[in-house]
Image (cartoon, coloured by chain):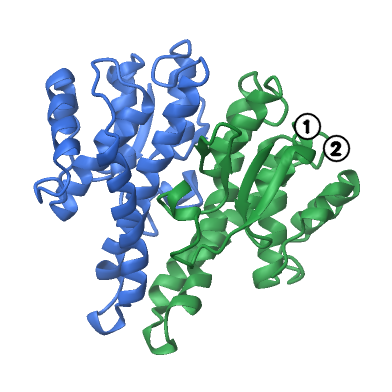
Chain colours: A blue, B green
Amino acid sequence: MLKLRSSAASPFGRKVKVAALFTGHADKLEMLPTDTMNPADPLRQDNPLGKIPCLILPDGTTVYDSRVIVEYLDHEAGGGKVIPAAWPARLAALKLQALADGITDAAILQLYEGRFRAPEKHEPAWIAHQGGKVERGLGTLEANPPVASATPDIGVISVACMLEWYEFRFSGLSSGKYPKLAAFAAEFNRLVPAFAKTKPHA
Amino acid sequence: MLKLRSSAASPFGRKVKVAALFTGHADKLEMLPTDTMNPADPLRQDNPLGKIPCLILPDGTTVYDSRVIVEYLDHEAGGGKVIPAAWPARLAALKLQALADGITDAAILQLYEGRFRAPEKHEPAWIAHQGGKVERGLGTLEANPPVASATPDIGVISVACMLEWYEFRFSGLSSGKYPKLAAFAAEFNRLVPAFAKTKPHA
C-alpha cells in the first residue's frame, strides 16, 4: 500500500490522485490527511519542505514533489501511462504541466497574502506581480486550450486540476473570462467521471 | 543553436548551464540576458509565467521550467547523462532535485520579502515559515550529504547550484552551520572545474 500525505483542497495533491487513476494506483493509495501549518504534523519529517503531496512507499521511502510522485506512479505502471514515453509528446506534456503548476504556484502566493498577513501588510505590487503570471498563463491556455481526453497525459491532467482549483479559490472559471478553458473542464469531467471524486473541498 | 533566457544570478538558470556541460550542449547555448521585472522584456512572450530559465529551440519552441529544460537536454544527448535512466537511481536524483529546488524557492521568497516590500510590510511569520523550509531542507542534506562526482546527476547538480546561490545571497555556507555541505561544494568544484565559470554574480 502507498500512503499519500495531502489535503482535500491541494491542487498538486489532486494531480497525483488523478494520475493514480490512470496508472492503476487508485485503490492502492491510502490518504493521510495532513496539516501543512501544524509543526507537529509528521509531514515535516517526511518532507523537510513541509509541502504536500508527499508519497510514502511500502519500504518507508518518501517521494516528493508532485511531479516526482507522478513520474514514480507512471514508472510503476510500466511507463507511458500519463507521461508520454515518446518525444516530442513527452516534452509537450511536461511543459504543459510546468505551465499549469506555475499558474497554481502564483495563485497560491496571492492566496497566502490574505492568509499570512494583516490587510495593512498586503503589498499590491506583489499581488499584481503574481496576478500577471496567472493572467498571462491562463490567457496562453485560453488561446490554445488543451484537448480533453479519456486517457489524458499529465499536461492535460495538470490543467484540469489547476482550473478547478482556481474556480474553487477564485471563481476563476465561472467568471466567463475563459470560455474555452471552461468548455475544456466540462468536457474533461464528461470523459473522466472519476475526476469529480477528487474535487477540491475545504 | 539553442538560446537560453536567464540571468547571471539565477540558481535555476545555473542548473541548466551545468546540465548543458554534461550533455554536450555547453557550446550550443547562446545566452540571452533577461530582466524578469521588465514587462517589455521578451521573456513574458516566451514564458507567460515570466520566469527564468526559458530555453528557445531552433524551431522557436520554448521550453520551461528548469526541470523540463534539463530533461530536454538529457534526452537530446541520448538519455541517462544527468538524469539516470535506471530506477531507483532516477527516483533518488529527481527527489534530490526537488529538495534543492524547494529550498531555493523558499529562500527566494525570503529574499523577495525585502525586494518587493517596505520594511513595515514585512511579515515575520511568513519569513519564518519559509525559513523553516530552508533550515529543515539544509539540515536534511547536512545529515546525509550528496556525494560529489565528476559525472554528477541532476540531484547532485541541483544541490551544488542551490548551495552556492545560498552562499551568494545569504552567506549560508560560510556561516559554518553546514560543514558537510561546504565540504561537498568544495569537492564538487574540485571535480568539476567548469562549474566555477557559472558562479552566480549580480
* Mark 1: secondary structure: loop
1 or 2: mark nearer the eye: 1
Give residue A168's position: percent from left, percent from top.
Answer: 15, 48
Where disc 2 sits, the SS reads: loop
The residue that mark 2 highlights is: B150
Query: Sequence order check: which comes first, mark 1 or mark 2?
Result: 1
Amino acid, disc 1: Gly
State the image coordinates of residue B190 (x, y, percent, origin top left).
Answer: 90, 49
Q: Residues within 10 Å of mark 2 (few under 14, many from 20)?
A: few
**Residue B92 location in percent, x, y?**
61, 32
Disc assigned to residue B12: none
Q: Is residue B156 left or right of residue B37?
A: right
- Please report the residue visible at 23 percent of the width from the left and 80 percent of the height from the top: A119
Q: Residue at x 29, y 63 (%)?
A: A110
User: What chain letter is assigned to the residue under label 2?
Assistant: B
Out of A180 and B167, give the one closest to the viewer. A180
Residue sitting at x 65%, y 20%:
B85
Residue that numbered label 1 is attached to = B24
Q: Amino acid at mark 2?
A: Ala
Count every numbered label the image shows and give the total.
2
Q: Position of residue A174 (x, y in %)?
A: 9, 47
Q: Residue at x 70, y 31 (%)?
A: B82
Can see residue B81? yes
Q: Which of the image's four quarters has the N terminus of chain A?
A: top left
